[in-house]
Image (tube, rainbow, N blue to C red):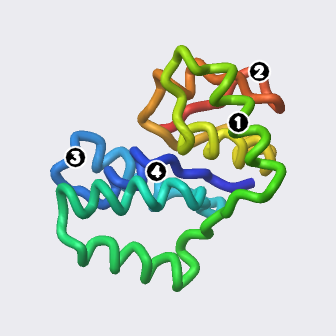
Amino acid sequence: MALILDTGPLYASLDRSDAEHVACRRLIEEAEEPLVIPAPVLVEVDYWIHTRLHPGVLVALLDDIESGAYRVENLIAADYARVRSLCDRYDDADIGFVDAAVLAIVERLGEPKLATLDHRHFGTLRPRHVDALVLLP
């Protein structure tokens, strides 16, 4: 089992001024399973860090990835078909590439939960492997 991190909790854990900082930091620090960042999430986190924080925060996150605190999960070829399917099926719900990619990885890894602050989108998406995801924190 792993704890897969969407953009919101990962970013909030890095930004002390974020309203969800304490809850997200606690979730990450107390996790007993490996922490997994879908690769597309890193692009969004990079954007928010450079928009709102200092570039040194990204360097610290990359240091954590290099040291093994997080595992980055890349999309594989089969994931792109699922991403396309999700983007098409939920086109009226504004499901973008990153959300669809996160769900594709969650499904491929067979995880029943997801760390996300985006309950609107992930509460709408129906995964293939469970009736609904448990959304944390």
Picture disc at residue 131: 2
Element marked by disc 3: loop
> Between disc 2 and disc 4, whose residue precedes?
4
Mark 4, residues whose alpha carbon is within 10 Å: few (<14), some, or many (≥20)? some
Q: CA distance from mark 1 to mark 3?
A: 32 Å
> Between disc 4 and disc 3, whose residue precedes?
3
Q: CA distance from mark 2 to mark 1?
A: 21 Å
Circle nearer the viewer, 2 or 4? 2
Find disc 3 in the rendering and name its residue.
18
Residue 79, image x, y percentages: 76, 48
Q: CA distance from mark 1 to mark 4?
A: 31 Å
User: Which quadrant is the N terminus positioned in?
Assistant: bottom right
Element marked by disc 1: helix
Picture disc at residue 84: 1
User: In the rendered structure, which amino acid carries the disc numbered 2?
Assistant: Asp
Q: Is residue 18 above or below residue 92?
A: below
Circle nearer the viewer, 1 or 4? 1
Find disc 4 in the rendering and name its residue.
27
Residue 36, image x, y percentages: 61, 60
Front one among 131 and 124:
124
* Label 4–label 3 contact, CB within 8 A: no
> Between disc 2 and disc 1, whose residue precedes?
1
Residue at horizontal 78%, vertical 50%?
A: 109
Quadrant of the image occupied by residue 8 = top left
Q: CA distance from mark 4 to mark 3?
A: 15 Å
Residue 77, image x, y percentages: 80, 56
User: In the rendered structure, which amino acid carries the disc numbered 1?
Assistant: Arg
Circle nearer the viewer, 4 or 3? 3
Residue at horizontal 55%, vertical 69%?
A: 70
Circle nearer the viewer, 2 or 1? 1
Mark 1, residues whose alpha carbon is within 10 Å: few (<14), some, or many (≥20)? some
